[in-house]
Image: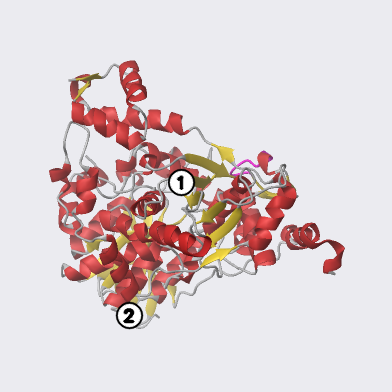
Amino acid sequence: MNKYEELMGKKGEIMLKSVGIDYSKYETGKLSFDYERMLRDTGYSLSDVMKIQSEVGVGNTPLIELKNLTTLARKVSKTGKAARIFVKDESCNPSGSFKDRRAAVSVYDAKCRGYKGVASATSGNYGAAVASQAAMRGLKCIIVQECYDSKKIGQPEILEKDRKCECFGAEVIRLTVGPELFYTYLKVLDEENYYNASLYSTYGITGVETLGYEIATECREKLGKDPDVVMITHAGGGNVTGTARGLIKAGANDTKVVGASVDLSGLHMASDIDFNRKSFTTGHTGFGIPFMTNPDRSDVPRSAARPLRYLDRYVTVPQGEVFYMTELLAQIEGLERGPAGNTSLAAAFVISQEMDDDQIIVVQETEYTGAGKHVLPQLSFARNNGIEIKVGNPEEEVPGKTVILPDHPSKMMAKDMDLDGYRKSYINNAVKRAEGNTIEPVDFEYLCVETKMDREKVAKLLEDLGITVE
Amino acid sequence: MIKKGTWVEIEEVVLQPEDRSNAIPEETKKTPLKLWAKGFCLEDSEIGEVAKIETVTKRVIEGVVTEVNPRYIHDFGDFVQDIMYVGPQAREILWGDSNE
């Protein structure tokens, strides 16, 4: 056993003391657990969460209609029609992204339970959100970031997030690429006895529910109806899960939940070489697909982010389109926002064109922009790392080799991904826990809910895998 | 010489290649997992020497000093000619020549 494996063996014990949740009590069958009970046990209702967030200036962000973008979509649409595009301007949250909603609940909970500090393992906006909330609540904060390749070269976007965390008084531990970030993180939790403000804890998810809830209620107030589609950038699954749960809590049961990720297919997330050949550090398929098909791979034993339960459709967009859309948003809507947050906007521009003029599509986030987190430094960085930047057909983009800005808005495309295929992989992964190739009836029910698939399909898949229900 | 109390960055090898996870690509596995942290030097030191620092959360850690008064190096990047068409083209489609 090497040093890494040794500490990983203590994982359960460290988790229990740092999250304060005994996950084992939610286990039901051989592979199932009681998800809804786990979420109920946070003890915070939707209105409690709203109150916690409003105390710290989180939430109630503006819902802005992108009229020029909608007109542009109609001008280039094959049918001449396109849904009205709205965006929830989440960059107005204190640290500049929707991640404040997640951090607000976790940090509040840490404070109530008497922890002296909070920690989180993230290279994304979530680090800044936790740092900002910790500053407000008077707690210490440590953020562990995957920041550099082995030559200490870092993505400008991550360097900016490092700065942002430090500006809120947090300590940032910056690491080279690799999943053993989790090793360093566990060590910090173990030594410092900090609260694990995990992105995947129940608190992290209930915090996002207010976002879905606000979208539904604002659409009803302003437009007299529920949105037809809510577009959500998908990475670890918390954004999709929380937003969709909020929509359901508001009773917006007919709203379609569509996920979008940046296409980084072919790039290995733990590769020292590929690390700086990508232009997006979150919201991409490198997180999106593994966390969809195996959600319990995170820093908590049972992730509260379970996107397959909620997704109606999942698309990917090339990197070049997201940069193009970011530039377009600034140029014709007067909104300068960070690129990563515009992933779902790029997809919404395409999907709106499949819809009617009187329909509504809501893009549920934006993020702040600034040095590093901006089209110019990110494209410059890509070019300096040997990526070819060109204007042309985005369908031809090859992640890690090219970034192609669409030469005309009519060239924008979103690729539909096979959700049924991911549901199948989910089941493949889930049944690995089933000893003796048998599962219990409670496991069967669980798999149906987890994958949002009908019973016959699940039964057939299990049969094909040689798994029997006891 | 770096005087005690100076703000510095240190580097530490967290895992040597042999201690790394087996589930990572070869190119990553052959490099050590490194860490960088910042804090106030607890003793006089030099770049390249091992020193103890106190971080902003009052943790005391040790590593090789890599930088004094480390600054942020990210910025708004180079001018990228390639994106210059995006706004004008969209305005032309939306409002035509009358936009001039």
Kind of residue at disc 1: Val
Q: Residue at x 73, y 48 (%)?
A: A76
Towards the viewer: B62 or A467: A467
The colour scheme is: secondary structure
Point 63% across, 40% down: residue? A398
Q: How many marks?
A: 2
Of residues A241 and A391, the one nearer the viewer is A241
Picture quarter with the N terminus of chain B: bottom left
Can residue B46 be seen? Answer: no
Q: What's the CA distance linking mark 1 and mark 2?
A: 58 Å
Q: Quadrant of the C terminus of chain B?
A: bottom right
Q: Residue at label 1?
A: A257
What residue is rendered at 33% in x and 42% in y? A295
Main secondary structure along the magenta-highlighted residues: loop
Give the chain of mark 1. Answer: A
**Side of A121 where A420 appears, left or right:** right
Which kind of residue does numbered mark 2 sit on? Asp
Residue A9 included in the magenta stretch of the image? no
Residue A273 - label: none
Task: Return the chain for callout 2.
Answer: B
